[in-house]
Image (tube, helix red, strand yellow):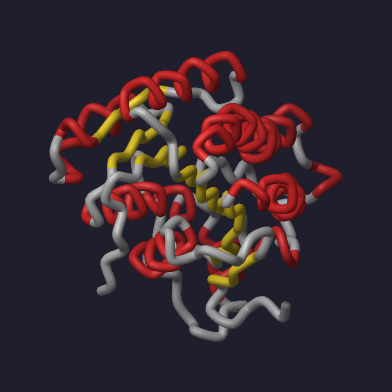
Amino acid sequence: MNTYDFQDRSAIVTGGGQGIGFSVAKRILEGGGKVAIWDVDQELLYSLIENLGGNAANILAQNVDISDPLAVQVASDSVQSSFGKIDILINNAAIVGPNASTWEYPEGEFEEVVRIGLIGTYYVSRAVAPHMISANYGRIVNISSVAGKEGNPGAPAYSSTKAAVLALTKSLGKELAQYDISVNAVTPAVAKTKMALSQDPDFLQMILSKIPRGRMLELSEAAAMICFLASEENSFTTGAVFDLSGGRATY
């Protein structure tokens, strides 16, 4: 397994208490970086330092609701104060929502999926970007989904949200390119996460049947690509979408 150099780098990982976010945070720490992990699950946050096995001084566990712009601003300023800078942002936090057809989808739950997965990503990016601009350096990786490329039947809110995240990535990438800040997205297929495994079994089987690799994405595989995009080695590419669909996506 490659180890990317994150010495003297500080990161924020939203939704970092478990799943892909946790795996990315672990690799950044292993590369010598510092990580602020944002999550709304307080129990996960309590156990983070022990589970990550890192130096407590390099880990900041914060209970942050990214759909609250004030909370996001306060938390980002806190990271800047604690670590001295914010070099890396991994926008990972999202919810899937229920499985239902578009015409049967509960209005409130549709709005909640969008509010966390898209509006929350916007709030966090808006709060962090000025810190990166001041430093003339930054790496932002937005975790989208193959659902954002193709649309999953029965998941209109999640699919719409993840498609919008791709457009936001492209806009922000162009806006920040002059400051040595890269903004890219990845589009994972279904991965072995608590969120994915909580889906209806028939829906999950339908999603798996679309993957030519014939299996779920491993968290370590996702973290490997994300950490490259978050590293100094990714010095040119921005506004791009990197596929993690196991052959499902056709573009």
| Residue 143, position as x, y percentages in the image | 56, 53
Question: Residue, x 68% and y 31% (percent of image)?
Answer: 115
Q: What is the quadrant of the N terminus in the image?
A: bottom left
| Residue 176, position as x, y percentages in the image | 67, 46
The residue lying furthest to the bottom in this view is: 212
Q: Is residue 78 above or below residue 213?
A: above
Q: How many marks?
A: 0
Q: Quadrant of residue 10?
A: top left
Question: Residue, x 49% and y 61% (percent of image)?
Answer: 229
| Residue 203, position as x, y percentages in the image | 60, 61
Question: Residue, x 49% and y 82% (percent of image)?
Answer: 214
- Judge whether residue 202 can be spotted in this image: no
Q: Is residue 71 above or below residue 207?
A: above
Q: Nearer the viewer, residue 9 or 91?
A: 9
Q: Nearer the viewer, residue 62 or 246?
A: 62
| Residue 191, position as x, y percentages in the image | 45, 63
- Judge whether residue 176 can be spotted in this image: yes
Q: Nearer the viewer, residue 4 or 141?
A: 4
Q: What is the quadrant of the C terminus in the image?
A: bottom right
Question: Residue, x 59% and y 72% (percent of image)?
Answer: 243
Q: Nearer the viewer, residue 235 or 203?
A: 235
Q: Is residue 17 above or below residue 199?
A: above
